[in-house]
Amino acid sequence: MTRKQLSQRIAFSTFTLISLVVVAILFVILGFIIVRGASVISWEFITGKPEEGMTKGGILPAIVGTGCLIVGSMIFAFPVGVLSGIYMNEYLGQNRLRRFINFMTNNLAGVPSIVFGLFGMALFVNYLGFGDSIIAGSMTLGLLSLPVIIRTTEEALKSVDDSLRTGSLALGATKLQTIRRVVLPVAFPNIITGLILSIGRVSGETAPILFTVAAYFLPNLPQSMYDQVMALPYHLYVLATSGTNMEESRPMAYGTAFVLIVLVLLVNLLANLLRKTLSKRVKM
Amino acid sequence: MKRFRRILEKFIEGILLSSSTITSLTVILIILFLFREGLGLFNRSPLEHNFIIAVSKQNPVQDLSSDQLKAIFNQDITNWSKVGGVKDSIILFTINDITNYFSEEELGASLENLPQKLNEFIEANPGALMHVSEKYLPKKFNGHTIHVKNISVGDFLFGKQWYPTSEPIPSFGIWPMIIGTFLVTFGALLIALPLGLATALFLAEVADIRLRNLVKPLVELLAGIPSVVYGFFGLIVIVPLIQGLFKLDVGETVLAGSIVLGIMALPTIVTIAEDALRTTPLSLKEASLALGATRWQTLRKVTIPYAKSGISAAVILGIGRAIGETMAVLMVTGNASNVPHSFLVPARTLPATIAAELGEAPYGGLHFKALFALGIVLFLFTIIINLTVAYIRNREKK
């Protein structure tokens, strides 16, 4: 073997080894949580309320709370994100306005989640007077997930072949008809994948909900969108760091982490499945 | 019909346009609200509401900075000559001391005689410095109030003490957190850069398509795990490990934060760097290979130089992710408010401070405003990072 080949062998083996380490880290973290958490999971844990200083019982209020926040934030962010993605890719060329909007969207994507928390508290909780509520938390989370949704929508639209657009326009269709009947159906699988992935992001965020909606302990389920709720990530944070009896509440923490992880895994799986099945259907 | 259709299309286009302005609007609103609350820290007296500092009429001192006041209350300064007055020792008089000087009968049941007594006291003690509520100040006061200088931006950024609730005067110096944030981020980079770039190189150049399709989704899955789960894992596994390994009293250290953050920054670095490596045109690589270079030489001499700016963007975005990360760091770094001097001591970061304290800060108070000012600093960091990335990408296009 020449020296050239040897150095290549060494370099590439190093890269492979390090990648294996990275994948191993992932499996260690997932495995740790899943192994320790799975033994806690029971029907009672999923459907019960926290009891005895959160050392027993279940996490139903946190599951319901996170559900409310997902639905609330997506009602707002889905349409706005997809519509602006469409506008940016289909209506704006590479002009100055597009660059400006792009820059602002990138900035928004880079804003730390705790700053979203500050902002949500200042605007929705205090200035608009919603108080700590589902609507304040949902709006904050919705704004936070906008850049991701816009970005994936844009990418999805970009991957649609231009010949489809010109073909449709040449047949006399208007721009809007082209977008609705030709471009969107083709881009749909990728758009929906992006949307589902942003659900995963929203369900795990803690910092933005700390001061806009999350309740430390609230066994009752919410009645309206102006109520506070418990949420899975915040519940895990509370159990891990500030429970009244940390040793006793450890199993509850493992269980909560398990539920969060499973939620994220399911969302990822669902997104991949949908992308595969849907794109088979629209393939031309 | 055709006209109606045209109006409808214009209308829908309007809706699309207004949707796409929302992100810009949000950024502007974030700036507006952060500054509205945060700048309040710098344009009002650092004293608690309604409290004043008063001295005798003869006392030439007109204003004091919060540092001087703090030193006086801590008895580090005991003479007026140190703060620009005449040579006379300072007699501290706070609302908690009144019973040392006056009996309850003298003051009256609801302190109705207190203003008069204050007058007497300040006349008898020209060196007195009184810290009392404004409502007890007599109508005809035999002294004058001292103007306490506002907190300056310099005090805020470079002050080494953060005692947001201390009485009578709080300290808002964020230097320990700035250093803490950078130290944790720097450590995270030391971990994430070699791992992340090597993985990106593996995915882009070494792995065959099947292996790549297996590994890449796994790396992306790392990005999907919520930050509290990382924090929890760090707290349960990494913190005790560090404590045992280095025989420390507490395992919550900068190092713990760096390890957790390093893992969290991996997916960002891997994904963006790999995308950048893939932009290198195949023709360039093939030309190099055809000249007899090995794949490793081609990678080093052609692919990496070509993708350099994309790789830098990946690194900077990774830094951005690490600086802004809140929950995981909050859970594993111990949140001590000293300036950290090594990787094995507790520290706190900017975002963790906001998360830990905003819930307890009374709405609209100085502490509350100080936390928003922290938010401004954090926001400015991210703007700088985004501008840098935009600059790098622009240069790449040219």
Image (cartoon, rainbow, N blue to C red):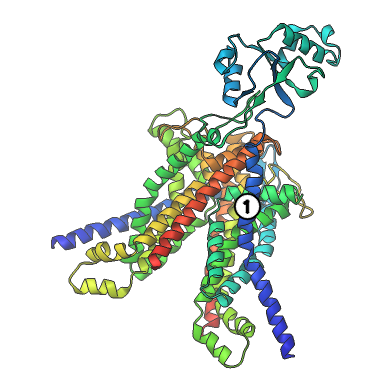
Q: Residue furthest left?
A: A2
Residue B21, position as x, y percentages in the image = 63, 65
Q: Which residue is mark 1?
A: B30
Q: Camera-side residue: B248 or B32? A: B32
Query: What is the three-letter code of the residue carrying label 1?
Result: Ile
Q: Is residue A88 visible?
A: yes
* Residue drawn 73% across the image and 88% down it: B3
* Residue drawn 70% across the image and 44% down it: A215
Residue A237, quarter of picture: top right
Q: Is residue A239 visible?
A: no
Q: Camera-side residue: B144 or A154? A: B144
* Residue drawn 51% across the image and 53% down it: B383
Residue B256, position as x, y percentages in the image = 45, 39
Instruction: Work out whether B281 lies above or below A21.
Output: below
Crowding around mark 1 (Cα neighbors within 10 Å: few <14, some 14 to 19, many 20+) is many
Residue A68, quarter of picture: bottom right
Count of marks placed on residues: 1
Q: Camera-side residue: B112 or A108? A: B112
Residue A13, quarter of picture: bottom left
User: In what element is the residue under mark 1?
Assistant: helix
Q: For mark 1, name the chain.
A: B
Instruction: Work out whether B132 lies above or below B242.
Output: above
Pick the quarter of the image with the N terminus of chain B.
bottom right
Pick the quarter of the image with the C terminus of chain B.
bottom left
* Residue drawn 51% across the image and 42% down it: B329
Q: Camera-side residue: B372 or B128? A: B128
Residue A189, position as x, y percentages in the image = 56, 74
Q: Residue furthest bottom?
A: A171
Residue B245, position as x, y percentages in the image = 38, 34
